[in-house]
Image (spheres, coloured by chain):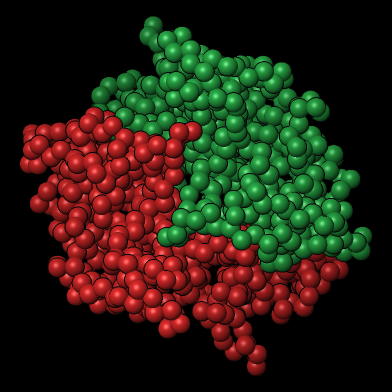
Chain colours: A green, B red
Amino acid sequence: MEKLVALTKRRGFIFQSSELYGGVNGAWDYGPLGVELKRNVKDAWWKAMVRDREDVVGLDSAILMHPMVWRASGHVANFADPMIDCKKCKKRYRVDEIQPDYEETGIVPTQCPDPKCKGELTPARKFNLMFETVLGPVADSANKTFLRPETAQGIFANFINVTNSTRIKVPFGIAQVGKSFRNEINPRNFTFRSREFEQMEMEFFCKPGSDDQWFEYWVEERKKWYASLGIKMEKLRFRAHDKEKLSHYSKATTDVEYQFPFGWGELEGIANRTDFDLRAHQIGMRSVGRWKGEELQDFQLVDEDPEFAGGKLSYFDEEEKRRYIPYVIEPAAGADRATLAFLCDAYDEDDAGGEVRVVLRLHPRLAPVKAAILPLVKKEGMPERARKLYDALKKRWPVVYDESAAVGRRYRRQDEIGTPFCFTIDGDTMKDGTVTMRERDSMKQERVSEDAVVRLVEERLEG
Amino acid sequence: MEKLVALTKRRGFIFQSSELYGGVNGAWDYGPLGVELKRNVKDAWWKAMVRDREDVVGLDSAILMHPMVWRASGHVANFADPMIDCKKCKKRYRVDEIQPDYEETGIVPTQCPDPKCKGELTPARKFNLMFETVLGPVADSANKTFLRPETAQGIFANFINVTNSTRIKVPFGIAQVGKSFRNEINPRNFTFRSREFEQMEMEFFCKPGSDDQWFEYWVEERKKWYASLGIKMEKLRFRAHDKEKLSHYSKATTDVEYQFPFGWGELEGIANRTDFDLRAHQIGMRSVGRWKGEELQDFQLVDEDPEFAGGKLSYFDEEEKRRYIPYVIEPAAGADRATLAFLCDAYDEDDAGGEVRVVLRLHPRLAPVKAAILPLVKKEGMPERARKLYDALKKRWPVVYDESAAVGRRYRRQDEIGTPFCFTIDGDTMKDGTVTMRERDSMKQERVSEDAVVRLVEERLEG
């Protein structure tokens, strides 16, 4: 992992945020290559989840939402970790960090775990993981809101808008890619657990009763997606949650986990959220008129008729001639986590003629640079000829031109950033119009016609 | 404008954020068509500014940065509006709203402008436009930070990382697309002035002395970009700021303004930021060790040697064999504003056989849907034939299939969302393999071969 972190910094994939001021814990910047890699991951998701389908539409909702959204969704009440303070040294701890069995046993530690302090601890209290901020110039509780901790609620909040403005019918999905924020106490494992991160979430609305089938369908679809981008399937597992450990909103959840160097980590959760969220917002909408800006913790939602299915967030099924609140299957993936998994999966070291070669075996669709064009020497018309080929490829894809250093060294540079193909222009090119095509993974070289290069790259990228 | 706002809501371009809870002032959601339109605007920018060039690389930095970034950049001290409170009714006003000449005269109003109140006003004080939040569980001033009010500082903060991890040389640019946040007192004009918005910013680093030339170059480049996407040039103007009205960091600024229905509004500012920002962060870096978490307002940056050009943020020019702090030309555009300008520019009503036709004359590259495939009737094999054509197009572009209602009405639906081409499958198609190609702007119809459709669309999109 240290090697990968060093490589990503050295070659411009990922930097620590605000490094020149000592860094910010839990926030990361994507450099010139990283921004292209992550963009490719997000585009591949969007293509599979929206573009290639007829039953899913896209959305891009705001990070700043009405605070009642988070009251209705349950985040104000439940999205919290139990914390404890030392009365003597004033340090703050997550309870389960000092008492790992806290959740099962309820046992609260009483003394500061710092052996130099051993001070008395306060009772445990909940610390909400949502970042707070204030909208507008007046800092009262009516203007206090949160940075969204998930993009999903922006989708639920637009359920009516989407059904009113399109002719899409249940079963259908709404997909969104965007930033979310969680004030993690302890960000860790590089970009894996950070405070600012990007999600790729889709909420699929279906008829109650068809939800189990759709759940299975989406677990399969998501498996296919990771496979299609070349991830090692033995490092991927699909772990169904035990019934008794499910979130309060979920009927079934399967986590997609990847075996990172630091252990198995969740890339995506596929959940049957039932009608929990739409029902919650229906109750929220009915209650909002009573809210006068008091603290949200103290505000009670009015659930006049919990079984009422005829409200604004219900759906009229024209085939069945009846109203219902749709059930929701949610495949919710992390864009940063998927990017990190693809990087870890691609990282390899092998033996290239006696020396260690570092290579990123990224799927060509994910590779930030698709090809490198290399004149063998900086003379005899080779640079000009190489530039011509470079220009032709650059119209279509991100490619690089590199004329400095020995060609072997230039191949290594490209291997290290995952460029799948190199094309070398040499003396023979000037005679017969062929170039050397060198393949990253096998290091195999073959002569191909200059005129065939664009088509060859196209085939490998789309095949 | 009201017509456009209604259209964008009805057809799923733009919704108010959290509408079901009464909305959030200054935040907007992009619906199924809006997300594609805005994505096309951003992709066109990225293509022109990064992909098609060799001297610009991309970046995606975090929204949450170290608070010292905003101290060094001048935002903590200067990014503020003067505000005033009424002691009687407790309302808060921006001073220049009740005293428009405040900035020139310094005259501060003394009585509440509400005729029913007329209470005494407090002295004016600065209200910072940055949203505050707290990182981590402890809410002390060392952990207080801001949501970035511009993406530019994320670029400056990565200047060293980018030059260290790539082989790019001055002059070069770093480009970024991402969300920024400003706590506007009075968000207005639809998506034009909002609290959460997306920027497309590029910082172009060049040798001091070459900056005036590069400034002119980028003004021209940006003009070409808007023109290439078909904006009406008579509605676009380039307004150079008077020397005495320039921001503290700028040597020259030209605003790109569009004539919206509500008046001229800024789409983009092109500024010669000199070496202000890199120099500021160099001073900030030297000072950060002294900062113990006191309020940033009270913390003084230590400018030991303001002329010192050999610091960490200087650049060693290998050709000139000397170190300097590069000058910066910044074309900073708003993605939401550009999207709104393209929408306003495209909106048209014309006469189509006696009735008013609403049409969005969007550039084909920006149109969210590229083509619609319409079987004339729902029988005689036409739907199947149309689906075949639809499938071939859908592999490449977002297209729709529509078989409901009279074909004239289906054309109108497509006109309203800006679909540049419709292809109708009719009786003749079944006989001779030709389809009707109907063009949005001219409403001209011509027969083309089914087999030529993919190529025709490709030509129009890329031509």
Q: Is residue B315 above or below residue B6?
A: above
Please determine whether, in this image, residue A350 is positioned above or below residue B207.
above
Point 66% across, 38% down: residue = A78
Q: Considering depth in this image, is A247 or B93 the residue closer to the camera?
A: B93
Please provide percent x and percent y for residue A339.
52, 32
Residue A305 left/right relative to B89 = right
Q: Nearer the viewer, residue A334 or A344?
A: A334
Q: Residue furthest top?
A: A354
| Location of residue B235 (image quadrant) | bottom left
Mark yes or no: residue B178 visible: yes
Q: Residue furthest bottom?
A: B354
Residue B260 percent location from the top left of the image:
42, 77
When asked about the image quadrant of residue B382, the answer is bottom right
Say how many tags the image has: 0
In the rendered view, does B205 fall on the left or right side of A400?
left
What residue appears at the point 28 percent right and 32 percent down from the top-left corner?
B292
The quarter of the picture where the C terminus of chain A appears is top right
The residue positioned 22% from the left and 47% from the top of the image is B277
- Residue B102, picture quadrant: bottom left
Q: Position of residue B54 (x, y in %)?
A: 31, 45
User: Which residue is depicted at the point 65% across and 25% down?
Assistant: A257
Is A215 located above or below residue B441 in the figure?
A: above
Residue A5 lies, in percent from the top left, at 42, 22
Q: Is residue B387 visible?
A: no
